[in-house]
Amino acid sequence: MGYLDNTSITVDAILTKRGRELLARGDGSFRITQFALADDEVDYSLFNEDHPNGSQYSGEAIENMPLLEAIPDENNIMIHKLVTLPRGTTKLPVVTANVSKVTLSLGSTTNIDPQTLNFQGLSNLKEPGGYMATIADRRLLVNFTGVGSSASSTTARPFTSSALSETIKGTSFSLTAINSTTLFGNNSKLLTTITLEGVDSGARVTIPVEISKEVIATSSTQGVTGVTLT
């Protein structure tokens, strides 16, 4: 969504491919239950406390900035989401994982285990609400599963020439790479990303994922917590 005109409350909503798919079913499965706000286009350095017309004009430059048009691409919009934190918070929560990069061979499986730093005054904590994991190109996985009491999972989607993202929920996640070379063409590897977002904190991190055409050992680069998957 995007506010097109800051002089009136006008909202432009553009559905993603997944949203259009659910809407086309006509069975009530398309329901907007959550939304998020972001300030990607705001340059706070333009706030001028010494504005010649007085302090009431300090934010004038920011308020008159052009706003981005809504686009259904999580890689280019809503990168900086707004979050609500308890009053008195001095450190922003940071989501980390046991891996900083995932490399998979055909048909291999690995796990991603996120934690949150600076949340509720603790250094490493699993958020009570869990985490949302978004794979940018769902075609590259045959299995994408969340672990935990409120976890969700998905199975492989029908073949498509277009990349489709998908989001699941859990306290940790299991990924299994495709076991077919159809999508590779002349490429020796395929690249995508997984974005982890804390449900309670709103903090998130993006991890690169590489699927190798060659049959090699599954590996994950050592992450912040010092755990290496093999």
Image (cartoon, rainbow, N blue to C red):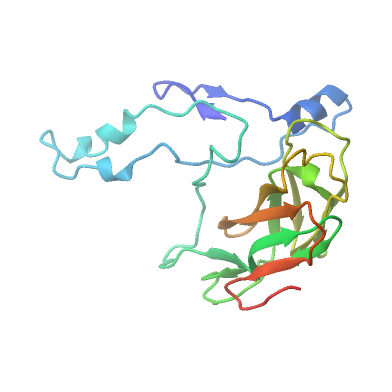
Q: Position of residue 138 (x, y in %)?
A: 77, 44
Q: Position of residue 7 (x, y in %)?
A: 39, 21
Residue name at image x 87 percent, y 25 percent: 25
In this picture, residue 167 sits left or right of residue 76: right
Q: Image quadrant for the N terminus?
A: top right
Q: Position of residue 171 (x, y in %)?
A: 74, 65
Q: Is residue 113 visible?
A: no
Question: In which quarter of the view is residue 8 placed?
Answer: top left
Q: Nearer the viewer, residue 147 or 200?
A: 147
Q: Image quadrant for the C terminus?
A: bottom right
In this picture, residue 139 sits left or right of residue 83: right
Question: In which quarter of the view is residue 87 placed?
Answer: bottom left
Identify whether 172 is placed above or below 71. below
Q: Is residue 164 visible?
A: yes
In this picture, residue 74 sits left or right of residue 69: right
Q: Nearer the viewer, residue 15 or 150?
A: 15
Residue name at image x 52 percent, y 46 percent: 81
In the displayed image of the protein, which residue is found farthest to the front?
Answer: 186
In the displayed image of the protein, which residue is found farthest to the left?
Answer: 52
Residue name at image x 55 percent, y 69 percent: 119
Q: Nearer the viewer, residue 70 or 112?
A: 112
Residue name at image x 73 percent, y 67 percent: 219
How many marks overall? 0
Q: Position of residue 107 (x, y in %)?
A: 86, 56
Question: In which quarter of the view is residue 62 placed?
Answer: top left
In this picture, residue 45 sits left or right of residue 221: left
